[in-house]
Image (tube, rainbow, N blue to C red):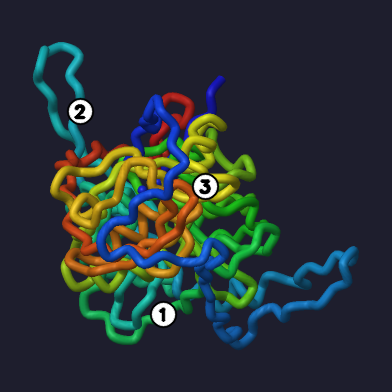
Amino acid sequence: MKSKAILISVLVPVLATGCGRSKVEKEAEPALPPGAVPVAASAAPTLNNGVPAPLPGAVPEAKAGPHEYVGPRSFAPVAKSADPSVVTIYTLGEEQEPSFFSRGKRGTRAAKGLGTGFIVQKDGVIVTNDHVINGADEILVQLSDERRLPAKIAGRDPRTDIAVIKVEGANDLPAIALGDSDALDVGDWVVAIGNPFGLSHTVSAGIVSAKGRGRDDVPLDPSGYYSFIQTDASINPGNSGGPLLNLKGEVVGMNSAIRGGGAQGIGFAIPINMVKQILPTLLRDGHLTRSALGVRIRDARDLSAEDRAHLKLGDQKGAVVEGVEPNGPADRAKLEVGDLIVAFDGQPTDRSSLLQWMASTAGVGKTVTLRVVRQGKPFDLSVTLGELKEPKRAARPRAAPRVVDPEDDPFVR
């Protein structure tokens, strides 16, 4: 039986086509585009991450030898510091109800939703999953002190499943600290807080099981941008939008999806760095306008040995250009089919999904530098990004999370 991915509140699709090859192999040096800057083959981009200071009362980090197990003495300090910033989100809307007796006629019925969120600004700005508030006509936020306050949508981005709501009339709410998800390592301890099945402020703990889980690992909306943190911390329907915390009490992820029918030790969280990157834009504009390179790409690791040899890729990782949009940004910069993009503005792009994310959030009209390898020869190339034309998306029908059977419907909140 094939596993299902389940939304618990849940980068441009890559088309898999073969790289074109000439029947006549030539060993001549590849021609570089105008303006390209050759670089030494050994020059590799690097990415440095800052380390935030620990919060008061956080679990101290212990030092251990190479074969000595060291774990936290208690997760209580993490839970105690973060819990006041975690909220329960109730939604009310309408959904279509099918009629079994009248063809083509549908009625409507009230649809109630339940999810989690966390306060990121003391003036009432709360981050949650987009699927928690999708289709809601009314939103009510319950704070840790059991006060219930109305809220409105401030911004949303369905493709990343990130949404921002704002509590009306708030001015001194307890905001939580946001950490650095790039600094996480597989095996690090993490703590999840949420409202599984309506059991408010439930705390569970586990480890980071994996990083960078994408569309192939979590079969959700194929048009989405995913790079999930996988964790074995217990997560269930109702945890959607809740924080995943490190031992410093900082948010490193937003719990969003589970695989299978419930808490099976396989949960997925959106990295908090993705949230931090688009949060200012969502608050300012209410939505995200994506930029674009104007290329169709795929992971170099997915190519056949024959294709890799033809393109002289060796063991290099990156995004291989499979198609170039006519008169688009990449076409104007003279990128070609078969080029390997290994860095975007100095940041490595060892996966095509990572390049999609960077290119789509850099900004329309911004000029960026790509590190490109063409037939084994690396060079830097400047490209001015265009605007990504987003397809129109119909609102997904809502469903009451505590009624739908996960085995019957792969998408439940």
Q: Nearer the viewer, residue 24 or 96?
A: 24
Earlier in the chain: of badge 2 and badge 1, it is 2
Q: Marks 2 and 3, Cα distance to the nearest angstrom?
A: 35 Å
Residue drawn at point x = 38 percent, y = 70 percent? 276
Residue 281: where, in percent of width, then height? 24, 69
Quadrant in the picture for residue 156 = bottom left
Residue type at numbered disc 1: Ala
Report the residue marked by disc 2: 97
The crowd level at tag 2 (other Cα within 10 Å; few <14, some 14-19, many 20+) is few
Q: Nearer the viewer, residue 137 or 337?
A: 337
Can residue 186 be seen here?
yes
Earlier in the chain: of badge 2 and badge 3, it is 2
Residue drawn at point x = 42 percent, y = 39 percent? 402
Residue type at numbered disc 2: Glu
| Label 1 element class | loop
Name the quarter where the C terminus is drawn.
top left
- Disc number placed over residue 175 in the picture, else none: 1
Report the residue marked by disc 3: 213
Count of numbered labels shown in the rendering: 3
Residue 66: where, in percent of width, then height? 87, 67
Earlier in the chain: of badge 1 and badge 3, it is 1
